[in-house]
Amino acid sequence: MTQANGFALNIIGERINPGFKSTRALFDNEDIPGIQALAVKQAEAGAAYLNVNIGARALTDVDFMARVIRAIQEVVTVPLSFDFPSKAVQEVCLASYDPARAGGRLPIVNSITEHRWDLMELYGQYKFKVILMASERVEDGVARGNKTADEIYATAKRAALRLKREYGMPLDDIFIDMSVSAIIADTESLNRGTIDAIKLIGSDLELKGVHMMGGLSNIGQQLPPKAADGSDLKHALENAFLTLTAPHGFDTVLGTPWRGYHPLPEEDYVFAAYRNFLEQTGTNALRAVRKFYRA
């Protein structure tokens, strides 16, 4: 873990992803030295893992996927996380990964869900950690989204204990993705539900050892860059979320390692506005969002 100004966090570096224009250009040009440099930059900034996602190309060019993995492992010792829903692609990733180059540390499969459990068929041949999505469950054979704290908690517990019971996976190898929602359209108290679910999971002794995580950049999507007090609104929102959840076991962020995170004091403008937002629903929640950037 990295001690990030008060938060003890695992940072999973997110930048090797075509969602970033500069990274997409590296993939388009097959710029392996550029990809390696990006891996080194994240590792040197304190990333505990590096997430690797080459986009849809992974489905048609697995050789390039394997090249990228081997090239990254030539220059860093940080373990990797493979961000693909396809079992076939994950198998190529796991076969290309060399644990010895990461000091024996296991890679992460990102991600499994109750309805996408086929990825666990690879666990016999390979050993890995998993990111477990708690945002959806299987009910009557159909995938359904979770919205309440109880639904998220029940899904996370059921799936995590299944991994432990059926596969012998240590709870410390499980990262539960809490699916942090954008506040701009959150009229159904999804942020509140996520935070309450984190508290439930964090207090459950049967789940002691699991990690809880999320991509915090989601929370400030489509908001203006500055809060009403002039602060960086999106970054402040990420810190507000962590201030409320880190004490309850939320310890892993899929993000940019050099971004930096720190607790916010009670009187912080954005922190106060976020706590107020969490108490609102429906149109009141939308009005509360405007208070972030309008004094």
Image (cartoon, rainbow, N blue to C red):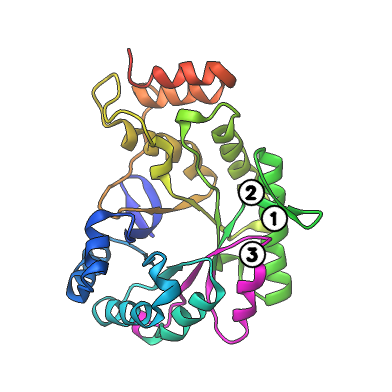
Q: Does the magenta stretch include residue 230?
A: no
Q: Do the residues labelled 3 and 2 touch (CB within 8 Å)?
A: no
- Work out which residue is located at the far top of the displayed protein and give it: 295
Q: What's drawn in magenta, residue-wise? A: 101-129
Discs 2, 1 touching: Cβ within 8 Å: yes
Marks 3 and 2, the one that precedes in the sequence: 3
Which residue is under mark 2? Answer: 201
Foreground pick, 199 / 194: 194
Mark 2 to mark 1 CA distance (whole Å): 8 Å
Label 1 neighbour load within 10 Å: few <14, some 14-19, many 20+: some
Disc with the residue nearer the chain's start (1 vs 3) = 3
Please state which of residues 74 and 96 is positioned toward the viewer in this rendering.
96
Of circles 3 and 2, the one toward us is 3
Disc 1 residue type? Answer: Lys
**Crowding at mark 2 (Cα within 10 Å: few <14, some 14-19, many 20+):** many
Residue 223 figure quarter: top left
The residue positioned 54% from the left and 44% from the top of the image is 248
Assign a secondary structure to mark 3.
loop
- The percent position of residue 71, horizontal first and vertical second, equals 27, 80
Amino acid carrying label 3: it is Arg
Compared with residue 245, is residue 275 higher up or lower down, i.e. above or below?
above
Tag 1 residue: 157
Residue 82: x and y, percent? 44, 70
Which residue has dot 3 on it?
A: 116
Q: In which quarter of the image is residue 42?
A: bottom left
Q: How far apart are marks 3 and 2 (CA)?
A: 22 Å
